[in-house]
Image (tube, rainbow, N blue to C red):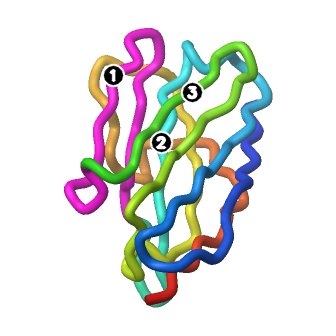
Amino acid sequence: QVQLAESGGGSVQAGGSLRLSCTVSGPTLQTRQMAWFRQAIGKGREFVAAIRGYSGRTDYADSVKGRFTISRDNAKTTLFLQMNSLKPEDTAIYYCASRPNSVQLKLYDYDYESWGQGTQVTISS
């Protein structure tokens, strides 16, 4: 059973930065494909970034490329999302998600089996 717990959300002004963390209990991160999703009020859950186990290959939504970086600390079994140059449209609840490792990076929420409780990110203009 994989358990995930996000932290690091908060309120910042546009142009600022936040770093989200997701603590993972259970299998090591190298055996799991991990991802960040977000959900704004009135919208569906949206893919943000993913990182593949073992290879560490990453992928990002076009809306966050060049601004967000997904990474992991295998020793501490922690997933990170560094968010820079934040915009008001980045406001959402951010979730980390986990699934068994796979050859291809999975970009849809229904491909992930374990979820954290979410952390709120609010960007003011």
- Check disc 1 and report the residue beneath it: 57
In which quadrant of the rendered view does residue 80 lie? top right
Instruction: Relative to 60, say whether 46 is above or below.
Output: below
| SS type, badge 1 | loop
Tell me the distance, in whole angstroms, between the alpha carbons under discs 3 and 1: 11 Å
Q: What residue range appears in magenta?
A: 46-65
Quarter of the image for the N terminus: give it.
top right
Quarter of the image for the C terminus: give it.
bottom left
Tell me the distance, in whole angstroms, between the alpha carbons under discs 1 and 2: 12 Å
Picture coordinates of residue 103, whole percent (x, y) = 30, 18
In which quadrant of the rendered view does residue 86 lie? bottom left
Residue 99 placement, left or right of 103? right
- How busy is the neighbourhood of tag 3: few (under 14 within 10 Å), some, or many (20 plus)? many
Please say whether residue 113 is one of the residues in the magenta stretch: no
Q: How many marks?
A: 3
Picture coordinates of residue 118, whole percent (x, y) = 67, 62
Tell me the distance, in whole angstroms, between the alpha carbons under discs 3 and 2: 11 Å
Give the residue displayed 57% in from the left and 79% down from the top: 122
Mark toward the viewer: 3 or 2 = 3
Front residue of this view, candidates 2 and 23: 23
| SS type, badge 2 | strand
Q: Which amino acid does label 3 sit on?
A: Arg
Give the residue displayed 64% in from the left and 72% down from the top: 120
Give the residue displayed 41% in from the left and 18% down from the top: 56
Picture coordinates of residue 111, whole percent (x, y) = 42, 43
- How busy is the neighbourhood of tag 1: few (under 14 within 10 Å), some, or many (20 plus)? few
Please say whether residue 48 is one of the residues in the magenta stretch: yes
- Check disc 2 and report the residue beneath it: 35
